[in-house]
Amino acid sequence: MLPSAINRTCHALRSRRIGAIAIPATFRGWSCWTWLPALLLIVGMTGPGSAQAPDAALEQSTGTTAEEVVVDVRPIGESDAEAAVMTVTTLVGEMLEAVDHNPDLRAEYDRIVDNPISPPDTRSPRATLASFLLIMHEANRIWFETRDAYLQTSNIKLTGQEQDNVVKVMALIEKASRTMDLSAIPATTLQRTSTELVLQLQEIFDRIYLPVMEDIPGIEIGAVLTDNDESTRPKWTVPGTNMTIELQEEGPRHGEYLFTAASVERIPEDYHTIQELPIVSDRGEDTYAYYIYTPGNLIPPQWFEIIQAGPDWLMFRFGGQTVWQWMGMALSLFLLLLATVLYIRWNSVRPLPLNLARRQFRSIIHPLLLMLAVRLTLYVCNEQINITGTTLLYLATIAGVIFWITTAWLTYQILQLIYIWAVHNPSISKTSLDASLLRTGFKVLSLVISLLVLGYGATQIGIPIYGVVAGLGVGGLAIALAAQPTLENFIGGLILYADGIVRVGEFCEFDDLAGTVEEIGIRSTRIRALDRTLIVVANGDLSKRKIVNYSKRDVFLFRHKIGLRYETPSETVKTISSRVYDHMLAHERVADDPLRVRLVEYGDYAIVIDVYANIKASNMDEFTSLQEELLYEIRSIVESSGADFAFPSSTVYLARDADTSDEPAIAAQVA
């Protein structure tokens, strides 16, 4: 029993504590056997028969004042060996002291802290915790030294060295996050969420006492791992917390000891529970609170002083953000919405290009601008206003959904532009079988690639796309059987939208129906007829009908026949044809191809000239106006050429026979 008690006592002495009493720094170098006589003296002086207080006994025996005594808040009933604890600052100081006296540890420390691409040591629970503490100690040192130096100046931007320091701090925080199992965090918010988790975990450790490194299972940081090392356990929990470091049995990080995913999930809750407790480490600043309530990336810009000098309510905290952060986010979203509305209105009044490739190129601009606007807004909210926590998660998720849907849309439009360029190849006829196959193939390919992009985006957001697809396969069959008519109409509406067959405001003819489309709903489409009656047609029925969309015409057909009198000389007919052709060709609103003015028929009562052309007009009113103008010019050409229009008439020819002897008798009979 005595050797066991001596070993426990020596372990407590090495941990710099005897029960609730901290060992002064003056005597921490004493060996176990040097301490035993002094320990017996202290115990004798503080026994039941002594009137001295423990503080007085400590002061008399060691020369240490009562102010140096640190009370250890630990669960009742723990043995002295289990209660060997210290603050983060003391624990890190002890490790740095060992680093200074051990070249091998110094090399390992430099590898972990100074090399930006080297991973943390996660070969045991002890090495994982030590790596986290050492990395964050160095990150805090660089962070606050750089911040204090910058805020003492009046510079608007960080210097090159200060920017390098910020990059190094972010790299160290990212490296500290690699001691955690972050597999449950969506990729879209992984970087920002991991930073918050690291700072929150640091604040939890700053408010509790941690065991000495000798009490943590496993090899120490930088030590050589042997096959017969029995000190490492598959799992270890930080005493007094729910933070568990466990061996990863599978996955890309197999064989590493990491803070478990369940522990990582509890970090925000534990932080908010413990944040009101005092910080027991020497560092008296809550790094997480400073990080989330200040703008910029780690170091606040100089304009933040204006907010700090403003009303106190600007810094009031609610919903995980301050008032000024909520106002900044609302203003950013309002500007995004305003810019979108203004662009849509401006684009609606722009003339539509007649060239198909230019028209398709314009279709690419829309999703591209939307993607840039979403990214810019997210950058302002994330990097400048510094929105964090749950609000950032919702904002990033919504922005991610919009971004990836827009990316799929952009992909489809780009592939359609490639198709248009390919079809316009002079070697491929627009009406050939190759063009038809190319058109169908590109549409299918564009749709498939767009769906793949959308599926990849869903995985980045955190949506289990494969589970969704499997669920749709099973549940979709049951829904389709139960709601077949409704689904038919719904899918019919999607077909109308996807194929671009009709749009609201277009004039169309549907078999025996004709009118202007007023609304395309989920179940039905509303059409306003020429007599102003309202026609409602189910989408499923409408998608099966023959649809003639007059509003989709890019040009209007101008075709009229000119009837000249048979008395018109041939040269005059040729002159009229030539002058009408030249006038049509010179007109800016008449398409060059096709354009025909030809003598096509000798009719019953007229010489017929056919005028065939396409008129560039945006609507029917404009076309009828241009048509009227051209018809007046054609009449003027005919009349100025000395000809006249033919009209239905009969010509009676009277002839006299050569023998005129019977004329009186004939005349008598007529009379």
Image: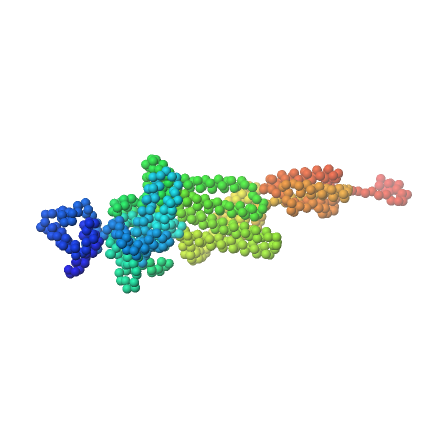
Frontmost residue, 314 versus 253: 253
Residue 655 image point, x, y percent: 84, 43
User: Does 345 sit above or below residue 130?
Assistant: above
In the image, what residue occupies the spot 63% across and 39% down? Answer: 626
In the image, what residue occupies the spot 35% across and 50% down? Answer: 172
Residue 94 image point, x, y percent: 25, 52
Q: Residue furthest bottom?
A: 228
Frontmost residue, 616 versus 531: 616
The quadrant of the picture occupied by the N terminus is bottom left
Q: Is residue 511 left or right of residue 174?
A: right
Instruction: Evaluate whether residue 193 shows in this view.
Output: no
Residue 214 image point, x, y percent: 24, 56
In the image, what residue occupies the spot 20% across and 52% down? Answer: 28
Instruction: Evaluate whether residue 438 shows in this view.
Output: yes
In the image, what residue occupies the spot 28% across and 55% down? Answer: 102
The quadrant of the picture occupied by the C terminus is top right
